[in-house]
Image (spheres, rainbow, N blue to C red):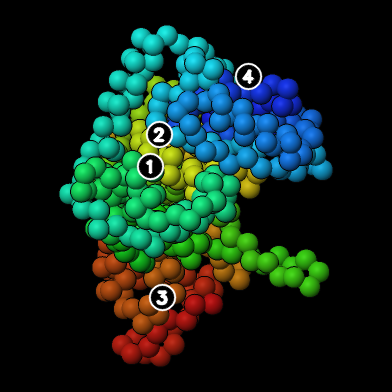
């Protein structure tokens, strides 16, 4: 098995014979991103070679980190088995930059560690401080206005994922550990992540066609990121199609868009959003696609294609928010969202697209193929092709079988004459049937 490529937050070492080089990588990653992962037992090209793991080898790694990295960090060090080969996995994070290894300072560039002078390091942190100024500034929310259940769910998930050391945490400990308080107030990042002040707005809707015209459902949620991630995922999964797969005596329900794809796109949208903008997060579910919009222009000088094809330097708008989402495994690999989404979509054979606008970034996951005339095959007993107006009317009648022509015209922004032609066409195609009188009857969906 090949584990993939090294990144700005992921480092491979063949054996613990490279302990000193590993310390350099840890300090470089900490200084650039504040969080990362290192494996002993994987070659630089990603091939898994294995590493003998004993209590002594685990102690050696722990002792070397304690003696070499300053200020002190508290990594999670554990054995991992892949393809029946033992590995040592080291998950580390820290907020007390700069970190040194053996008294020297390093920065991560792509998959390399570069020693830097004190002047270079000072310039880097001044620029980083400027980028993260909004996150660290005090919000209007006081410390007591925190969603303690969301904080607890975060640390339980992070510990279970092995990205936070196992300990007896409290809400004040978590807020202080990750710099989410400023005096008597939550920071902006702290409020966005865990506030109970409804700091973030998420708009969701289901539309009858692939245009944002006729909606079948529309809601607006106001909450913190931790809760909205779950809300958004559940809304999408509730409104897309599922199929049953039977293996032996087991029946498994499988969504048309895998959960891993949905989670990764949602989490990256919240991680890289601009929270001082005029637009809100938005999920739109259409017959042919699901779109996920996040406010804020595209932040990097590199294109999404360059991130997918190579190992470009990551540009992270919200470092603290991104770190929290990485630690609780909402984001699988810190700073590599496009590459992972591309891989997940290819594995699931889900087509996707993205669009960077003046006010935000929209990611589209396609549900089915639309032909050149805009016609979509709907989920009916026959393989019948309908146009957009027919599809909109058909979708409305599924939920509102007693709708009159006038009500259908109002909902679809069409004339009554157009609606009548559409109803006649749907009836001729065997998709609907009228039961009862014109005044008191209703439509039956076949």
Q: Is residue 132 visible?
A: yes
Mark 4, residue position? 21
Judging depth in this view, the residue of 438 and 36 nearest the camera is 36
Name the residue carrying label 1.
Answer: 178
Where 166 sits versus 386, above or below? above
Looking at the image, is 291 positioned above or below residue 28?
Answer: below
Q: How far apart are the two marked residues, 1 and 3, measured between alpha carbons?
A: 47 Å
The residue pinned by badge 2 equals 95
Residue 123 location, quadrant: top left
The label nearer to you, 3 versus 2, is 2
**Mark 2 neighbour class, 10 Å CA radius: few under 14, some 14 to 19, many 20 or more:** some
Give the residue at x 47% y 81%.
444
- Badge 1 crowding class, 10 Å Cα cut-off, few under 14, some 14 to 19, many 20 or more, is some
Judge the density around disc 3: few (<14), some (14-19), many (≥20) Cα neighbours within 10 Å.
few
Whether residue 187 sits left or right of residue 324 in the image: it is: left
Q: CA distance from mark 4 to mark 3?
A: 63 Å
Sequence-first disc among 1 and 3: 1
Residue contact between numbered discs 1 and 2, judged by CB atoms under 8 Å: yes
- Residue 159 position (above or below residue 216): above
**Residue 5, visible in the rendered structure:** no
Q: Earlier in the sequence, mark 2 or mark 4?
A: 4
Q: Which residue is mark 3?
A: 399
**For this rendering, which residue is in front, 125 or 353?**
125
């Amino acid at each position: 098995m090949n584990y993939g490529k090294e990144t700005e937050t992921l480092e491979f070492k063949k054996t613990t014979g490279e302990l000193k080089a590993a310390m350099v990588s840890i300090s470089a990653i900490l200084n650039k991103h504040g969080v990362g992962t290192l494996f002993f037992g994987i070659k630089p090209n990603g091939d898994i070679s294995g590493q003998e793991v004993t209590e002594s080898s685990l102690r050696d790694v722990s002792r070397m980190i304690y003696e070499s990295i300053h200020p002190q960090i508290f990594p999670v060090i554990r054995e991992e088995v892949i393809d029946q080969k033992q590995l040592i996995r080291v998950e580390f994070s820290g907020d007390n930059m700069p970190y040194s290894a053996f008294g020297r300072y390093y920065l991560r560039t792509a998959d390399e560690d570069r020693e830097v002078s004190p002047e270079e390091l000072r310039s880097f942190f001044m620029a980083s401080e400027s980028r993260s100024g909004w996150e660290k500034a005090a919000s209007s929310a006081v410390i007591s206005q925190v969603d303690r259940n969301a904080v607890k769910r975060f640390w339980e998930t992070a510990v279970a994922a092995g990205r936070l050391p196992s300990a007896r945490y409290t809400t004040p400990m978590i807020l202080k550990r990750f710099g989410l308080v400023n005096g008597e107030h939550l920071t902006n990042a702290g409020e966005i992540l865990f506030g109970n002040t409804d700091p973030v707005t998420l708009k969701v809707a289901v539309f009858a066609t692939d245009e944002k015209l006729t909606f079948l459902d529309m809601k607006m949620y106001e909450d913190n990121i931790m809760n909205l991630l779950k809300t958004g995922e559940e809304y999408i999964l509730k409104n897309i199609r599922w199929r049953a797969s039977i293996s032996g005596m087991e029946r498994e329900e499988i969504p048309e868009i895998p959960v891993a794809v949905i989670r990764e796109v949602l989490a990256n949208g919240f991680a890289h959003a601009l929270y001082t903008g005029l637009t809100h997060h938005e999920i739109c579910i259409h017959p042919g696609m699901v779109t996920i919009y996040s406010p804020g222009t595209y932040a990097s000088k590199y294109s999404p294609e360059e991130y997918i094809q190579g190992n470009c330097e990551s540009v992270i708008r919200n470092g603290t928010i991104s770190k929290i989402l990485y630690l609780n495994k909402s984001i699988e690999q810190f700073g590599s969202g496009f590459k992972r989404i591309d891989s997940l979509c290819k594995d699931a054979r889900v087509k996707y697209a993205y669009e960077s606008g003046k006010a935000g970034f929209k990611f589209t996951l396609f549900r089915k193929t639309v032909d050149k005339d805009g016609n979509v095959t709907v989920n009916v007993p026959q393989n019948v092709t309908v146009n957009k107006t027919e599809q909109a009317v058909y979708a409305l009648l599924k939920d509102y079988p007693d709708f009159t022509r006038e009500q259908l015209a109002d909902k679809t922004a069409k004339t009554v004459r157009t609606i009548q032609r559409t109803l006649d066409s749907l009836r001729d195609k065997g998709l609907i049937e009228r039961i009862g009188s014109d005044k008191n009857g209703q439509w039956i969906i076949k």
